[in-house]
Amino acid sequence: MPEMPEVEVTRTGIDGPLRGACVLAARMGKPLRWPLGVAPESLVGRRIGPVTRRGKYLWLPLDAAPGASASGGGLLLHLGMSGSLALTDGHAPAGPHDHFDLVTSAGTLRLTDPRRFGAVVWSASLAEDPAAKLLAPLGAEPFDPMLTDAGFHAALHRHRAAVKTVLLGGKVVVGAGNIYACEALHAAGIHPMLRSDRLSRPRAARLLAALRATLAQALELGGSTLRDFRDAHGVSGGFQDQAGVYGRAGQDCRRCGGTVRRVVQGQRATYYCAGCQTR
DNA sequence: AGTTAAACCTGGTTGC
DNA sequence: TGCAACCAGGTTTAAC
C-alpha cells in the first residue's frame, strides 16, 4: 500500500507531535514480518527524537532512558502492503489488526496492518544491524540532488529487466511502488516493458523528471488511498482520483485517447497506454 | 550476479 | 445466497 508519498505523509504527521515525547508503554499484538528484537518494556522511559524516512522505511529514534543502563537506539518501521500509523488519544481499544502500540506522553502511536507484511524492528542505530542490513540494498532517494540524469541513466543500464520491474525493485531508485511506477512511466511516455538498459539518455532523464513530478504531486495530495491508507490523523489521500493509468484498464487515456491496458510483470499488475507509451 | 518465482497474510470483490 | 477464485499499495528469500 504505502509507497514513498504515503510513508512521507505519515512521517510528517507524527514527527512534530512525537518529537521529545516520552514512551510510557509499548504493546505488541500479532507477529509482523520480523520480531521486534527487544522486550517492549525496554522502550519505556525513552525519549523520541526526529522521525526520518529512508525509502519506505521510517526511523523513530529512541534515546536511552535517563539513568538506565540500556543504550540508545530506535525503531525501524515499515507499513508493508496494508499498514498505516495513527496518532490517537489511545482510548480506543486495540482491534484485531492493531499490532503495535507505542503509548507516549504525546499520544498513542498505533500500527494497524491487516496483512501483517509490515514491520517494527529495534535497532541500536541505522548503521548497525538489523537496520543496516535492511537499508543496504536500497537505491537513491528520488529527490536526492546527487541523483543526476547521467547517474540514473547509468544505473538503469546495469539492469536488463523491464524498466517497470527495475523501478519497482528499488535498487536504482527507491520510493516508487506499483502505482507511481506505472504513473511515472505514463507521464514519461515510456513503455513499461522496455528493457531498462535500452533507455536512451534523454528518455532516462525524462523518466527521472516524471518520477519526481509524480511523487511530488502525490505528496501534495496526501498520497493515494486505494483501500486502507490513512495519514496519521485518519485522512485519506487524493492522488488515486487522478491517476492517468493505474486501475483504469479498458478506459481511455486522458492524454492521447488510446485504451489503457493491464498486463502482468513480475507478478504485479502494470497499467499503461499503448498509444502514447512507446518502446 | 542478475532475474524470476514463491512466500509471507488477510479481506474485499468477482463470477459461477 | 454460497463459495471458490482472484485481486490488492511490498519486500525478502530461494531457485534458476
Image (spheres, coloured by chain):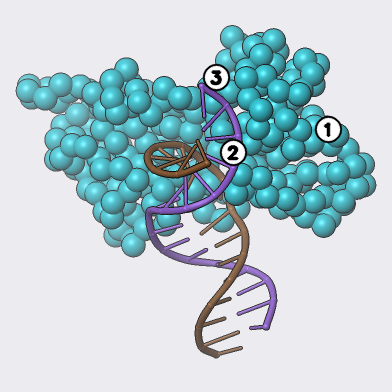
Chain colours: A cyan, B purple, C brown
Q: Earlier in the sequence, mark 3 or mark 2?
A: 3
| Rendered view: A211 above or below A80 | above
Q: Which quadrant of the figure has residue A91?
A: bottom left
| Rendered view: A259 above or below A160 | below
Q: Secondary structure at mark 3?
A: loop
| Rendered view: A190 above or below A237 | above
The chain letter under disc 2 is A
Q: Are marks 1 and 3 in contact (CB under 8 Å)?
A: no
Horizontal and vertical percent for residue C5? 58, 71
Q: Identify the amino acid type marked 2.
A: Gly
- Dot 2 corresponds to which residue? A177
- Dot 3 corresponds to which residue? A140
Left-right relation of A208 to B2: right
Image quarter of the C terminus of chain A:
top right
Give a yes or no on whether discs 3 and 2 share a subunit: yes
Q: Secondary structure at mark 2?
A: loop
Horizontal and vertical percent for residue A190? 80, 32
Q: Identify the amino acid type marked 1.
A: Arg
The Cα–Cα distance between marks 1 and 3, rounded to whole angstroms, is: 25 Å
Res A279 label: 1
Left-right relation of A130 to A191: left
Tell me if mark 2 has few (under 14), some (14-19) or many (20+) residues whose alpha carbon lies within 10 angstroms of its own: many
| Rendered view: A93 above or below B5 | below
The Cα–Cα distance between marks 3 and 2, rounded to whole angstroms, is: 14 Å
Which of labels 1 and 3 is toward the front?
1
User: In the image, what residue occupies the spot 28% across and 25% down?
Assistant: A129
